[in-house]
Structure formats: structure tokens, C-alpha cells
Amino acid sequence: MTGIYMREHHLAVCKNCFPKWFEGRVAETIERYKMFKKDERILLGVSGGKDSLALWQVLIRLGYQADGLYLSLGIKNDNYSLDSKEKCIKMKEKLGRELYIVDLKNEIEISIDDARSIHLKTCSICGTVKRYFLNKITREKAYPVIATGHNLDDEAATLFGNLLRWEESYLRRQYPVISGTNFFARKVKPLAFMYERQCAIYALTSGIDYIRTECPYSSKATSISYKENLNQLENRHEGIMKFFYTNFTNAKKKDNAMMKAEEVEIVSCQICGEPTTVAVCRFCRIKEKIMNKKKNETEKREK
Ligand code: Q46
Ligand code: ZN
């Protein structure tokens, strides 16, 4: 039987053993970073992609209580949103867990496709919308933990971008686990030390049906070029991505000052009531901009 060779670990694992090996490594991360316990309910953001669906299955196989939240963003190209929702529903049925589905169109009468009309970067708006609903539903359903399927490639690309722009406040916040507060649940990334290709192999070797096409907006995401550069480095210097991110997290662990996030006052958004650091949260500001733009266009047409 052909083995799966992982250069960075100097290890070959056969197809049949790979899922167990992968699950074992995720379990180590969860324990090392004290992410959650077996009696804590976890809400996991699922997109229909390989990472989040793999994580959902791993958590259930490890005996954790994880439910999913799928956000239908209204990305119409290639029916991307419809296909991704169907993959999440399939996984919910396989695992026998709860899946919450939030349809952006029903919630706020706009979709991610509308974002282009206000000339903001689609992925930046998408990120705000996802964080908003993940936080909101987590609190409404009283989950103490939010999990996301960010893998090592994602985390290394984010770190790379934060360092290039010297984004100090983001660097302080970047870590595989962020403690909860009175306003927000604990945030965890159990796949933070697993390479993207390892997540893909796990999905394939353990029979996960995930969406194979990329989001139509992903080619414009800045993180893609960071990932391409990091992958080039990885090809020449095996394991460099892992060193980069692992040594960053180790340095943060040693130095308490690096872990300390800036203290900011949290207030309730004047429009939606969600916790925010400014009078009107970013989500409400974006929504208002899109609605105004639509209103102006309708008025122009009617004139
Ligand atoms: S879903 Fe959203 Fe991603 Fe698509 S619009 Fe960009 S951020 S690429 S993870
Ligand atoms: Zn708001």
C-alpha cells in the first residue's frame, strides 16, 4: 500500500492509518492549548469546505459536543452557496448533530454579492458578516466556545500579512485560543497546526464530501498571494511554515506582554445592540451603506 509521506515530519502513514494519525494530532493541539473540555458545547462555523467539515468530524470522533453554523452568503456564481450548504447538511446527517443555517438574504435583505456595489473588498465584508453572526448565534444559543476550521496555511498567511504591515493589535490577538469575555465566547482553532494539504488528505481518506470549487471571490483575497509565497518557501525549505507559526505561538506563550490584548471598552451597538467598540458596529455600517446605495438606485430608476 502506498504511504502518504509528510516531509516536514519525516514520516509516512498509509491511507488507512492517516485519519487516526490526523485526529491524534488535532487532539494534542486541543489538549496543549486547553481549548475545551468534553462537557462543553462547541459551535463550529462550517462552510462546506474540506477544513471545517473535517474538523467537525474529528471533534465528534474525539468525543466532543460540536454543532455547526452555516451562513448562506448568497454567493450566486456557480451556485456556490447552494452547493456548500448541501455539503454541510450532508455532514450534519452523517454526524447526527445540530446545524444552524442563517440565510443572509432573510436576515438583512442583502447578499455578499451586493458588497461590490459599495466598493469595499468582498472578503473584508464577508469576514465581518461571518464574525457577526457567529458571535450572535453563539451567544443566543449559549455556546461557551466558537471553533473555526482555520488551518496552518491560513494562520501562517495571516501572520505573514500582519507582520508585513506590522499590525500590532492583530498580532497580539493572533493565537490558537482566545479566552472568552462577558461579551464573547472563547474562540479556538484546533486545525491551526495542520497543513492545508493534510486537511485535504484527511477529507479524502475519511470519505468527506466537501465543496471542491473555490469561492468565486477567493482569487482576489490578499491571503492567496501570501499563501502562494509561503508555499514556494515551503517547497524549498520543508517545514518552514510550521516553524514560522509554531515559533510565533511559542514566543507568545513565554512572553505575557505579547499575549496582552489592548484593553478596549465594549458598548452595545446603537442599531443592533450587539457588542462593539464603537457607537455603531461595522456590520450595521456596511448594511446601511448597501441599503442606501440600493435605495438611491431604485429612486434613480423610478425618476
Ligand atoms: S467565502 Fe467570503 Fe472567503 Fe469567499 S468572499 Fe472571500 S472571505 S473567499 S474564506
Ligand atoms: Zn450593529
Image: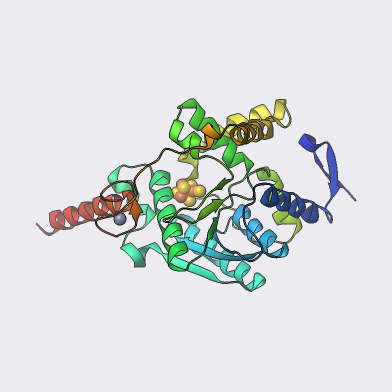
Query: Residue at the spot x=74%, y=55% of the render?
Result: 23
x, y percentage for residue 20?
79, 56
Asked where in the image residue 89 lies, by quadrant, the reply is bottom right
Instruction: For residue 118, say whether it is visible.
Output: yes
- Residue situated furthest left in the rendering: 303
The quadrant of the picture showing ligand 2 is bottom left
x and y, in percent, of residue 80 in the image? 49, 57
Q: Is 227 left, or right, of 284 in this rendering?
A: right
Residue 54 position by quadrant:
bottom right
The residue at 61%/72% (across/down) is 97
Name the spot of residue 252 as percent of width and height, x first. 59, 34
Quick check: 168 above or below 86? Answer: above
Q: Is residue 26 above or below residue 272?
A: above
* Residue ID at (33%, 42%): 120
**154 vs 83: above or below:** above
Q: Nearer the viewer, residue 56 or 204?
A: 56
Most foreground residue, 17 or 171: 171
Query: Which of the pair 296/285 is nearer the observer?
Result: 285
Q: Residue 222, can we see it?
A: no
Which quadrant holds the C terminus? bottom left
The image's colouring method is rainbow
Is 260 left or right of 88, judged from the image as shown? left
Indicate the position of residue 302 as horizontal and vertical percent values.
12, 59
Query: In the image as oriented, which residue stretches furthest toward the front?
Result: 256
Residue, x 83% and y 36% (percent of image)? 10
